[in-house]
Image (tube, helix red, strand yellow):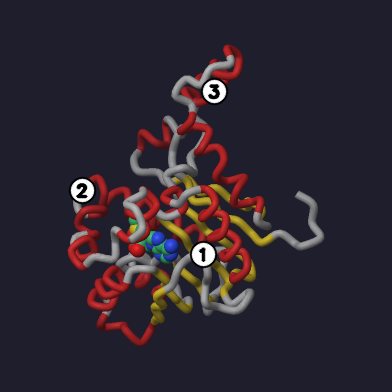
Amino acid sequence: MKSMTKEYFRKYHYRDAEAARTYDDRKFGSPSLARYNRSTQKALDRALRLLPDGSRVLDIPCGTGRWTEFVIRKRMEYVGGDISLEMMQVCLEKYAGIRKAFDLVQLDGTALPFPDKTFDAVLSFKFLSLLPQEIRLEVLREFRRVTRRYLIAQSQHLRTFCPWRALKLLFAHVFGIEWRTKKYRTRAELLPQIESVGFRTVARIRIVRSFLDVLWPFDLEYLAVLEVRDENESR
Ligand SMILES: C[S@@+](CC[C@H](N)C(=O)[O-])C[C@H]1O[C@@H](n2cnc3c(N)ncnc32)[C@H](O)[C@@H]1O
C-alpha cells in the first residue's frame, strides 16, 4: 500500500462517506465561511459573464457540487468531475430534483477522459494548491488540452499584492536569507505555472468579503481568469 504521504492523504481523504457527508458543513457552514462562499460565487458570476449561454463548463474537482446549480442557472451545460464517488454522491442527493440537467464523471485530474477542446471553460476551485508541483503541472496540461477558451481558477495561493509579503521577500533577497519566505515564493509561483502550460491571464477578480477588503485590498484571494494562448503567440 502507498505510504501515507501528504499527497496520498489529499487525493484519498475525500473518498470516504463521512468526509463527504460533512464537507459542506465544515467548509461553508459557519457565518464567516458562508460569507466567503457567497463572495466567491459573486466573483465566479463575474467571470462567467465572459461566456455565452449554452457554453460547456467542466468543473474539476466538483466535490459535492458547490457550483453545479449555479452554473446550470446561468444556462450553461455543466459537467463535474472528481476522483471521489462519495463527494459526487452528495452532489447527486443535493440536486436530485435537477438530476437530468448535469453530468458527473469519476476521474483523475491528471488524465481527463475527454477529447481535446471539449469545453468552453474549466473551473477549478480549492484544488491547485493541494497538489504537489509535478502533479499540478500534469493537471494543468490536461485543463489546457480540454478547454477551448478559458480556465477559471481559485486557490489560496492566488492572492493580490501584499506589502508585508513584498517587504519580507525584499529583506530575504537583500540579506540572502530564507526567512519564512517559502510560503510566499510558492504563492508567487502558481500563476506563472498555470500560464506556462499555454494560458494568459485576462482578469483577476478579487474575492471581496467585507467593506474592509475594499479599503485594504491587499493579500486577498482572487479568481484567475485565463485564456488559452494561441500556439504561435509568444509569452
Ligand atoms: C477541497 S475539495 C474541493 C471541492 C470543490 N471544488 C469545492 O470548491 O468545494 C478537493 C476535491 O479534490 C478531489 N480530488 C483530489 N485529488 C483529485 C484528483 N487527482 N483528481 C480529481 N479530483 C481530485 C477530492 O476528491 C475533493 O473532492
Task: Give the amino acid type for the residue marked by disc 1 in the picture.
Answer: Thr
Q: Are marks 1 and 2 in contact (CB under 8 Å)?
A: no
- Seen at 59% across and 77% down, the residue is 118
Q: Reading the chain from its start, which is encountered first: label 1 or label 2? A: 2
Residue 133, compared with residue 76, is above or below; it is: above
Query: Residue 231, position in %: x, y?
Result: 77, 62
Q: Is residue 137 left or right of residue 97?
A: right
On the image, the x and y values in percent for residue 148 come to 64, 70
Rendered-image quadrant of the N terminus:
bottom left
Checking the image for residue 110, the label placed there is: 1
Q: In the structure shown, which secondary structural element does the residue marked by tag 3 occupy?
A: helix
Mark 1 vs mark 2: in front = 1
Q: Quadrant of residue 192?
A: top right
Structural distance between the alpha carbons of marks 1 and 3: 32 Å
Q: Are marks 1 and 3 in contact (CB under 8 Å)?
A: no
Residue 122 image offset from top left, x and y in percent: 52, 66
Counting residues from the start of the chain, the first of labels 1 and 3 encountered is: 1
Q: Is residue 187 above or below residue 196?
A: above
Dot 2 amino acid type = Pro
**Residue 18, position in %: x, y?**
18, 63
Q: Upstream in the sequence, badge 2 or badge 3?
A: 2
Residue that numbered label 2 is attached to: 31
Q: Is mark 1 within 8 Å of ligand 1?
A: yes
* Ligand 1 in which quarter: bottom left
In what element is the residue under mark 1? loop
Q: Which residue is mark 3?
A: 169
